[in-house]
């Protein structure tokens, strides 16, 4: 069955749009410190009862990946940012399992794919782990749906050679989960992550659609300049 995917443009995520709305941080006095951000959104609606959200999300993901690769080419690689959700007590079991042992399905899907070391982040007696897994062609569907169902995951397209370094992953983690009122987030803050990464030329993929939703969507987030180049390609 052919799955239809609609595409819409949202050139400014800080004003009303059809993708996602960002609210300018109140703590930033100088508005010029906030980069312009937009999105190209791929949406697929459930036209048949037999279709599942996994199918709809995969179709949107493939469209987004195809667009990026057609324009960006080899220098850009897709990465699944994998991070623990809740903080966990640093027990012997947790310290032994770390990150990848908890995501064997992703690792075993593409055993030859590049993956980073597991980066440990501590907060008092609790700990979380984070890492990056390269999204090869055989992992697109699984990575897209993993990002859809796991609020602490994100998909990043980047041409940076140093993105898998511990320091880079640590920065991605900090921008993904900034403190709010002294509390650490456990789901990705897309505005914070986009403000940090997109001006450097990175692109983000945010996947939505859960439970009884009748549609799934992939928001391709970037600077208006990069998105315009993509759409005009």
Image (cartoon, rainbow, N blue to C red):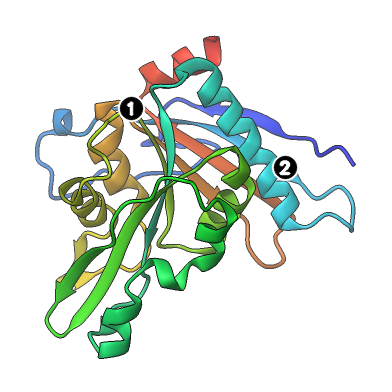
Say what secondary structure mark 2 lies in: strand
Residue 4 percent coordinates (x, y): 79, 35
Q: At x 32% / y 88%, what residue is drawn?
A: 93
State the residue lying farthest toward the top. Answer: 232
Camera sees residue 23: no
The relative height of residue 91 versus residue 170 in the rendered view (above or below) is below
Question: Which class describes the residues within 10 Å of circle 1: few (<14), some (14-19), or many (20+)?
Answer: some
Residue 24 lies in what quarter of the image?
top left
Residue 9 percent coordinates (x, y): 55, 26
Q: Which mark is residue 159?
A: 1
The residues bearing labels 1 and 2 have C-alpha atoms spaced at a distance of 28 Å
Q: At x 54% / y 49%, what residue is drawn?
A: 207
Q: In the rendered view, does 43 fall on the left or right side of 228?
A: right
Residue 2 lies in what quarter of the image?
top right
**The N terminus, quarter of image:** top right
Residue 22 lies in what quarter of the image?
top left
Residue nearer the viewer, 94 or 124: 94
N-term mark: 1 or 2: 2
**The C terminus, quarter of image:** top right
Q: Which mark's residue is nearer the viewer, 1 or 2?
A: 1
The relative height of residue 27 versus residue 126 in the rendered view (above or below) is above
- Give the residue number, with chain letter if any, for mark 2: 44
Say what secondary structure mark 1 lies in: loop
């Amino acid at each position: 069955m052919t799955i239809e995917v609609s595409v819409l443009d949202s050139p400014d995520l800080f004003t009303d749009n059809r993708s996602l709305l960002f609210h300018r941080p109140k703590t930033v006095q100088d508005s010029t410190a906030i980069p312009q951000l937009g999105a190209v959104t791929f949406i697929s609606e459930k036209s048949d009862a037999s279709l599942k959200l996994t199918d709809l999300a995969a179709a949107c993901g493939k469209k987004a990946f195809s667009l990026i690769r057609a324009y960006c080419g080899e220098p850009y690689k897709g990465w699944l940012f994998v991070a623990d959700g809740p903080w966990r007590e640093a027990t012997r079991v947790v310290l032994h399992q770390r990150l990848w042992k908890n995501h064997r399905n992703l690792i075993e899907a593409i055993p030859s794919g590049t993956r980073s070391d597991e980066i440990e982040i501590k907060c008092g007696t609790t700990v979380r782990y984070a890492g990056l897994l390269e999204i090869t062609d055989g992992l697109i569907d699984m990575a897209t749906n993993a990002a859809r169902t796991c609020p602490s995951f994100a998909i990043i397209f980047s041409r940076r050679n140093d993105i898998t370094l511990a320091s880079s992953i640590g920065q991605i983690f900090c921008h993904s989960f900034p403190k709010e009122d002294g509390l650490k987030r456990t789901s990705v803050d897309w505005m914070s992550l986009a403000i940090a990464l997109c001006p450097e030329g990175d692109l983000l993929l945010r996947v939505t659609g859960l439970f009884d939703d009748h549609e799934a969507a992939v928001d391709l987030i970037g600077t208006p300049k990069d998105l315009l180049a993509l759409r005009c390609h």
